[in-house]
Each structure stands twice: as C-alpha cells, then as structure tokens.
Image: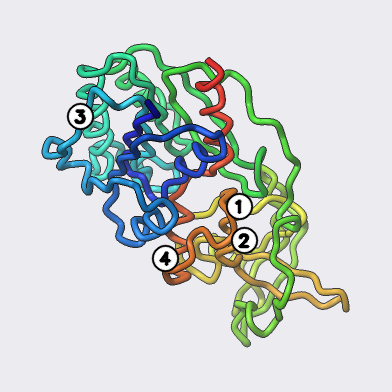
Amino acid sequence: MGTVVLSLFDGVSAAQVALQRLGVDVETYYASEIDKHAIYVTQKNFPNTVQLGDVTNWREWNIDFSQINLILAGFPCQSWSVSGNQKGDNDERGKLFWTMLDIIKEVRKHNPTVEFLIENVKMKKEFEEYITKYLSEAVGEVHKMLINSALVSAQSRNRYYWTSWKVGVQPEDKDILLKDILETDGLRKSSLAVLKIDSKFYEQPSNKTEGCIRVGGISMQEPPPKSFSQGQRVYSIGGKSVTLSAQGGGQGAKTGLYKIDLPDGDYYIRKLTPIECERLQTFPDNFSEGISNTQRYKCLGNSWTVDVIVHILKHLIKR
C-alpha cells in the first residue's frame, strides 16, 4: 500500500514534486485548493490528484481519514507575516489556522500515527510561539525549524516548518547565486527591460542582507529619493534574489528588479522571468506554463521551495 497524502492549501503541489524526487509511492493525493490557476497547474502535472475544494468545507469531504498517512499544510501567511497586516487569527485568513488544526485533529482520531508538515513565513516571536503552543496542544510533540531556501536555491526565503518528526539539520548549502539560474538564450534588452523611458537607475553602495545585494533603485525623480520603495529597489545578480511574492506592486512586483550587465559594458534592469522563478523554487522548467505570466508569478510566489521539502521529508523516510 502506498502513501495517502492530504495537502491543505495545496497551491501548485510542490509537495508532489518533492515526493516524486524522493521516489515515494503515493497511492492517493488529496488536495484542498481554491485558486483555479493553481489547480490547473497541479492537474496538468499530476492528473491523478483528487481536488477537494475549500478547506472550510472539510466536513463534507467524502474521504476515509483513517487511510491518510501524511498531512501537508502551508496555511495562509498574510496575517502572520511581518510584511502583512499582523492581525494573526483576528483576520479571516488567519482563522484558517484553526480550521487546519480541526482537520488534523479529526484525522488523528482515525489514524493516531499520521505524520504532518506545516509551513509558514518567518514572523515575530509572539506569533511563532502562539502557533507552536496551540499546534502542540492539538497534536502532541512538534519539531520546529527555520530554514532559508537560499541554502538550496538562489532565493532568500526564510520559512518556519513544524513537523511530527525530527529533522534537526539544515540542508547542505549548494552555493547557488542568481546569476547561475538566469535565462540567457534569446533574451534582449528591448524585450525584458522594465524601466520606463523617463525612469533612471541610481547606483548606491552595495547593501547585503540575507544574501541579497541591493545596488540601487529606479526613480523618475531628479534628484532621486533618499530611500526607494520595495518595488523600486534594484539588486545584483551576484547574490541571492529577494523572496518571491504573490503580492506587491511597483515595477519590481512579485520578483524584484535586477541589474543585468551586458558584455559590451552596458546594462539593463528587469524583473525575473517565470522560468527563472521556477528555478528559484526548484521546480522543473515550464512547470507552471499554461496560465498567464501574472498568474505564474502569483502561483510560484505562493508555493513551497521543492528542495527544502525534499530535505525535510527525507528525514521522515529515513526514520
């Protein structure tokens, strides 16, 4: 008998890619997701996925909870993140934390040995302790780790992972920089530059934070502002990318802006391509194709970094 998985807030099913890389025999993969674009990507790549719909309707799901071996859940982060509204479970999306706990407790009633992997953003200590406390009260022993995707990819992406098994060690650092994963063939300044004609790049002394090297910003002001907004900041390809996001505005929305140097000494400023974002999340190239670029950026920004999940699940398989 193979593994039966219940994935809550499944997105584009990064966990299925991880399980596939590990050679895990998945008998049934149940996915709860409401974004039609994410569902399209999942079904394109994993057509046998059983889509369950909205997590809030879980009591209506016609599944045998006793057969579930593994629960996966990356519950919505907007109300917990330091860059979000920080209302926690006083926000409607934040309340889905409790829906997730109810589902886990229900499955454990039918299968007390079910394993789980829960993920969310790096958040203030008060929120992290709150989530750990109530998760532990609901399910018993919990192991928590903070892992930066920068160890396995060219993206700085700090995330908390709570598991029912002990992982203990961080992933091995693969020392990948953004310049290592950029598309090069056929890319032209005219097709990918995002600067408006009347925008200018203003170089600044390099400022390195969590592996991301900020080298300046773009502005239509003369002189430029003393500080640039998130969507105006420009980064070097000699470091890590900023964290991919499903939200955000400005010219650098969702991917950030990067200075691309050309062989003739010229340069241009652009966002990342969807394929480059797939590589930052360690998906195969073109995994998310078939939907608009806007939706590809959103789906990938909402996703897990596949090779981080591989690292975590590998320790469950060893056990």
Residue 319: x percent and y percent?
A: 52, 15
Q: Residue 175: which numbered mark, if any?
A: none
The Cα–Cα distance between marks 3 and 4, rounded to whole angstroms, is 33 Å
Q: Residue furthest front?
A: 1
* Mark positioned earlier in the residue sequence (2 or 4): 2
Q: Residues within 10 Å of mark 1 (few under 14, many from 20)?
A: many
Frontmost residue, 130 versus 192: 192
The Cα–Cα distance between marks 2 and 4, rounded to whole angstroms, is 15 Å
Vertical side of 50 occupied by 196: above or below: below
Q: The residue under label 1 is which amino acid type?
A: Leu
* Mark positioned earlier in the residue sequence (1 or 3): 3
Residue receiving disc 3 = 64
Vertical side of 300 occupied by 195: above or below: below
Residue receiving disc 4 = 295
Residue receiving disc 1 = 280
Q: The residue under label 2 is which amino acid type?
A: Glu
* Mark positioned earlier in the residue sequence (3 or 2): 3
